[in-house]
């Protein structure tokens, strides 16, 4: 499990290492080297998801490791409080950024091994601190640094650690 | 809730990256939104809805139709207004994609704003040759006769019309292809001074302030889709033009 300590409270995440081995190893590697410490949730959309793991409080994007293979064909669904990897339009383009679904987002699920159908790889679920996620999803947002839906007051991951 | 207004994607098999970017954008921005308005020139060319049933020529459109259908099944309201490239989009396409056709222009209410939506080509009245062509091809009888021809014949016609249009553009002064100010004013007056007129077609994204008969009105212009796209985002309390980065 991984614990995210945020300025809104703690979020504990269970990881699906069997279903998404590459993605979980990738996530843990970022956690262990402290990559997420001081990183924000920069894209917050109530009724959709909260995305973070890529920008610091000044909306400066952090350099990431190599992109990983998309494991969205693992049978897991983008259900409420699951975590999935964010990516560009290229299916295998996830690196550090992830998002927490704040509702069942069926349209993000794998449907076929095509550019259109790959979907977004679920690799974990919030098991403690769902009320923290609920607080985060409702914060007021604005435009910042060429991005939309950025929280007016930063939502900061102060520390991310692997816990037993 | 958020609504999006877009135009001038000119989707075609020649520019697959734009289609990819559009489909990705639907997933990450529109699938959770309230509605999507497409104000014409969505496709580079449309020769009739029966193209969807043609194995060879229909294949490129199917991912788009399926993606729109998925959105609409998920509860996003989809609206489509014809452009000068895709004026032959009909009820079959609308049904397959789960969208509703709008006449040009259409007035919508967004919060306390009335927004008049249009593709924009009808406002380019300085281009008399084009307006002549437009009234011909928007005529239902002409359309019926055209659609009665074989798919191959229609594709050939469209190809020729496009080459002609490209040639005309090359020799015409730039101004003639922008909207005509008095055509804009006439439209605003006819629709009783909406706060906003929003259109595409000219590929000149901008916001223009107008004052007509002591009424303030803004003319918002969307951009086309290449390396970037300029679209309109409508929230409960705000409206803005947003530039999307389409390249990787």
Image: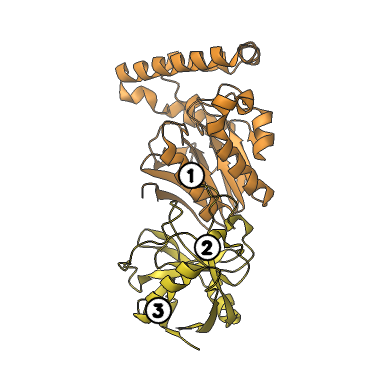
| Residue in front for this viewpoint, B128 or A21 | A21
| Residue in front for this viewpoint, B51 or B95 | B51
Q: Is residue B156 left or right of residue B146?
A: left
Chain B pictured colour: orange
In the rendering, at what x and y percent does residue A155 appear? 45, 76
First along the sequence among labels 2 and 3: 3
User: Which residue in the structure is indicated by mark 1?
Assistant: B22
Same chain check for tags 2 and 3: yes
Number of the label disc, if any, that sits on residue A121: 2
- The correct choice, above or below, for B226 with respect to B156 in the image is below
Mark 1 or 2: in front is 2
User: Which residue in the structure is indicated by mark 3?
Assistant: A31
Label 3 sits on a secondary structure element that is helix
| Residue in front for this viewpoint, B86 or B117 | B86
- The residue drawn where x is 39% and y is 47% is B246
In the rendering, at what x and y percent does residue B64 appear? 56, 39
Q: CA distance from mark 1 to mark 3?
A: 33 Å
Chain A pictured colour: yellow
Question: Which quadrant holds residue B160?
Answer: top left
Extreme residue toward the bottom, this view: A164
Q: CA distance from mark 1 to mark 2?
A: 20 Å
> Callout 1: few (<14), some (14-19), or many (20+) C-alpha neighbours within 10 Å?
some
- The residue drawn where x is 44% and y is 24% is B124
- Assess whether mark 2 and mark 1 are in contact (beta carbons under 8 angstroms): no
Label 2 sits on a secondary structure element that is loop
């Amino acid at each position: 499990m991984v614990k995210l300590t945020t300025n809104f409270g703690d979020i504990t995440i269970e990881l699906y290492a069997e279903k998404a081995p590459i993605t979980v190893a990738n996530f843990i590697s970022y956690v262990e080297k402290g990559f997420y410490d001081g990183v924000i949730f920069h894209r917050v959309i109530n009724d959709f998801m909260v995305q973070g793991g890529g920008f610091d409080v000044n909306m400066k994007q952090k350099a990431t490791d190599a992109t990983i293979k998309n494991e969205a064909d693992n049978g897991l669904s983008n259900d409420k409080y699951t975590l999935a990897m964010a990516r560009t339009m290229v299916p295998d383009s996830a690196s550090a950024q992830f998002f927490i679904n704040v509702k069942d987002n069926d349209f993000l699920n794998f449907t076929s091994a095509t550019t259109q159908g790959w979907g977004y790889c679920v690799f974990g679920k919030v098991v403690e601190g769902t009320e923290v996620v609920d607080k985060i999803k409702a914060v007021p947002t604005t435009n910042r640094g060429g991005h939309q839906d950025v929280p007016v007051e930063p939502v900061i991951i102060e520390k991310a650690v692997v816990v037993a | 809730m958020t609504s999006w207004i877009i135009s001038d994607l000119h989707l075609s098999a020649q520019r697959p990256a734009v289609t990819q970017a559009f489909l990705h954008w639907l997933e990450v921005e529109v699938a959770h939104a309230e509605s999507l308005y497409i104000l014409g020139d969505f496709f580079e060319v449309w020769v009739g809805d029966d193209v969807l049933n043609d194995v060879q020529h229909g294949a490129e459109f199917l991912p788009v139709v399926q993606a729109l259908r998925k959105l609409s099944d998920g509860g996003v309201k989809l609206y489509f207004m014809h452009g000068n490239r895709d004026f032959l989009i009909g009820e079959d396409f609308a049904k397959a994609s789960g969208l509703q056709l709008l006449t040009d222009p259409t007035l919508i209410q967004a919060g306390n704003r009335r927004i008049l939506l249009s593709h924009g080509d009808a406002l380019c009245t300085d281009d008399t040759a084009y307006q002549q062509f437009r009234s011909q091809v928007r005529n239902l009888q002409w359309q019926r006769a055209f659609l009665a021809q074989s798919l191959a014949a229609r594709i050939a016609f469209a190809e020729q019309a496009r080459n002609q249009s490209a040639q005309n553009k090359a020799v015409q002064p730039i101004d003639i292809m922008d909207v005509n100010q008095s055509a804009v004013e006439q439209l605003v007056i006819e629709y009783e001074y909406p706060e906003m007129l929003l259109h595409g077609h000219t590929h000149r994204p901008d916001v223009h302030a107008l004052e007509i008969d002591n009424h303030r009105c803004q003319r918002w212009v969307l951009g086309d889709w290449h390396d970037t796209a300029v679209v309109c985002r409508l929230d409960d309390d705000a409206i803005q033009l947003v530039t999307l980065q389409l390249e990787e």
